Image (spheres, helix red, strand yellow):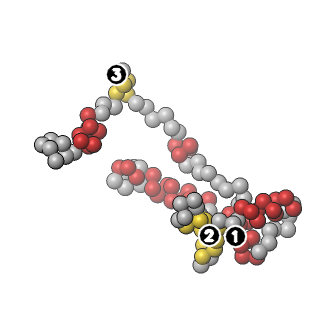
Amino acid sequence: VKMGKSNLGPDNLSRIDSRVDGQRFEDIMPDAQLFRLQCAPFDLQDIVVFLKMGMALEGMKTLERKKLAIHVTPYMLISGDLYKLCRDEVLHQCMFKHERTAIMEEAHGGIAGGHYAGN
């Protein structure tokens, strides 16, 4: 390693100025958008019922039942918890809405601020 070349990444990052043409960057993303999560086309409860019972709910139309049967193929129940096998071949645990909201609030609204602030 050459003299003074060991920390190029952090050294370059420390030189970045937070101003462009004399103006400071503003936070343009509203907090409400940060809490927006992509949801599955079917309710997670429908998927759990389908996997446990092997059939769709009574009120569903035939086309919806077929779509649900196709949609549940990457999902599995392990000890009562719902998991999805994703493209990266890693099982991701599915969270219901109240669980997701609690996790997001804990990660981003802690005492130290966001997760980037040492929380």
Q: Which residue is mark 1?
A: 48
- Residue 81 falls in image quadrant: bottom right
The residue at the point 74 percent across, 70 percent down is 50
Question: CA gap, disc 1 to disc 2?
Answer: 7 Å
Residue 99 location in percent, x, y? 57, 62
Whether the residues at callouts 1 and 3 have beta carbons within 8 Å, the answer is: no
What secondary structure is marked by label 3? loop
Return the mark for residue 22. 3
Residue 35 location in percent, x, y? 55, 49
The residue at the point 69 percent across, 66 percent down is 73
Question: CA gap, disc 2 to disc 3?
Answer: 51 Å
Q: Which residue is mark 2?
A: 82
Q: Quadrant of the C terminus?
A: bottom left
The residue most toward the front is 1
Whether the residues at callouts 2 and 3 have beta carbons within 8 Å, the answer is: no
Residue 111 location in percent, x, y? 38, 54
Question: CA gap, disc 1 to disc 3?
Answer: 54 Å
Whether the residues at callouts 1 and 2 have beta carbons within 8 Å, the answer is: yes
